[in-house]
Image: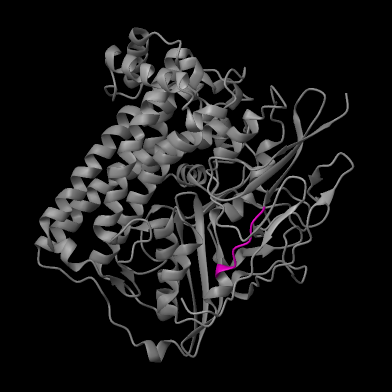
Amino acid sequence: MAKKHIIVDPITRIEGHLRVEAVIDENNTIVDAYASSTLFRGIETILQGRDPRDAGLLAMRICGVCTGTHYQRSIEAVEDAFDVTIPKNARIVRNLIQGALYVHDHLVHFYHLHALDFVDVVSALSADPKKTSEEAIKWAKVAGTNPFIEGAGQFKEIQERVAKFVKQGRLGIFGNGYWGNKHYKLTPEQNLIGVAHYLKALDIQRDLAKMQAIFGGKNPHPQSIVVGGVTCVQDIKNPARIALFKTLLKEGTKFVKQAYLPDVYMAGTMYAEEATDTKATFTELMQGKGVGGTGGGLLNYMAYGDFRLDDTGFYKSALLFPAGVVKNGDLSKVYPFDPDKVAEDVTHAWYEGTGAPEHPYEGTTNPKYTGLEKKEDGMAYLKTDEKYSWIKSPIYDDERMEVGPLARMIVGVAAKDERITKYVTKFLKQANLPIEVLFSTIGRTAARAIETELMADVMMEWVDELAANVAAGDDSTWQDFDFDKVSKKSRGVGLAEAPRGGLGHWVKIEDGKIVNYQAVVPSTWNAAPRDYKGRLGAYEAALIGTKVANAEQPLEIIRTIHSFDPCIACAVHVVDTKGKELGVYKIDTQCSI
């Protein structure tokens, strides 16, 4: 049988516009894959000529999801350029805003973007509510806790709600799934647990968003972070505001521990077979042997590091998430991260370029759209030998990298970080899963849940640290600096970890104005096309070797892509699958905002 070409466009349940083309062989196994962002933003161009102190308010518009982390990275890039060290209260507040984003974002991703890749909603309608209750207790025990929803009556009520939606034809986002696909592996009772927690998570995520607004002023697009510190002085001095943050955090943490983690234990166990192609021991994995399950991909992991734990200054502080690089899945060695080794290649991206990868300080963003290739069958395919994506191809030390929660956990374990190793080890031990499951689609999903529990726990320490510091008489939130002196000619970088991975903002300033600005975001690293050497990006590599049960229902492709939590921001140029131009939009990058 001849190879078959599959187009999935658009990939849904993500932020932004993403197209994936895969080639499957006669065994329905993916032998080639291409990821393409079908949008152009141009935010970096808009920032040129602006006052650097305003950069954060514009840069946060790069994304509608993790707005606060772009905001903070941009502010930190300017602070790096001006050599500003922020006060302790400002550091803790920024950690709390960013930490709240992590917990909110990871929970929303698992339940409302990714869970339906594992949970068959229609199957849940045939579940026995009493057996569902017993199943919920079983998986909560694995997590060492009690179930968030336990009673058979509660599960029966939720089941009847969904059945009513079905009868009335009001399934909404549940209405067009690949229900019944044989690569759904949960039992009807397990599916009902997933549906119940999906619906409850809609309420929980609303309260988690409030946490970001307490110190950020609003959500999305917080506005309390400024060059030199934060502006939420009254909030940190008001015990009631800190107490509200803590109350919301406790409720969110309860759901994480009693619903999110048990659900990931359940899914991880039921899908463990396809997550492990080997039976390597921990010792063998520490020697770089026997790694890689379905969706493993590049096996090169990179973390910039994030969440400063002291006040010794940028890139000097101890970090909650250590910076580093792990290559070829070898947990026995972690390489130090060097920002000077970051570069972007545009060989297969719709941009003009010199042909040589550019460091972000010297990077350019000049669009050069060359379109899709029309075929005789009426479909339009990517020109994969040429340019085929709006995403550039980042490389580190001339190698492709994966970033994200899995990369942070892998780097943490390889670096022998005590806290991260403790949480990863506990998860794997309680689930009775081997460590090699981390190197897979399932592992990527598990790493995000492990990180969410870790973050929720450590935030409780931070909010107490903030309260104690203010109670001791320290209400400083901002550090003064001489703008006119430092803005003649300088440059800086804000490097940290967004929920989806390493995020960097690079800025060059001359005579008080931005002359160049480049942001290399997590989905740039992961969703990128091939580079100048023809090496695959992380999405593309993760799809190779995946077996598709039904080419007309590419559930497995979507599951692996969703495990990265794609975040690909707003489009100004869209085409349909047949290459027809739907609209062209022109932006005046010099207009006032």
Seen at 29% across and 12% down, the residue is 152
Q: Which residue shows up at 59% across the image and 41% down it?
A: 330
Q: Is residue 93 left or right of residue 25?
A: left
The percent coordinates of residue 156 (x first, y second) are 33, 14
Front residue of this view, candidates 519 and 143: 519
**Colour pattern of the rendering:** one colour
User: For this view, does 392 lie left or right of residue 213?
Assistant: right
The verdict on residue 42 being magenta is: yes
Residue under the image location 62 percent in, 17 percent down = 182
Is there any visible trace of residue 433 in the rendered image? no
Q: Position of residue 206 (x, y in %)?
A: 31, 43
Residue 487 visible within the image: yes
Stretch in magenta: 38-43
Q: Position of residue 368 (x, y in %)?
A: 74, 66
Asked which quadrant contains residue 388, the reply is bottom right
The residue closer to the viewer here, 478 or 342, is 478
Residue 211 covered by magenta stretch: no
**Which quarter of the image is occupied by the N terminus?**
top right
How many numbered marks does the figure carry?
0
- Residue at image location 51% in from the left, 67% down from the top: 505
Predominant SS along the magenta part: loop
Instruction: From the top left corner, tell me how far across and down residue 574 is, in percent.
Output: 67, 55
- Give the answer, above or below, for where 123 lies relative to 275: above
Does residue 44 appear to the left or right of 499 in the view shown? right
Q: Is residue 298 left or right of residue 483?
A: right
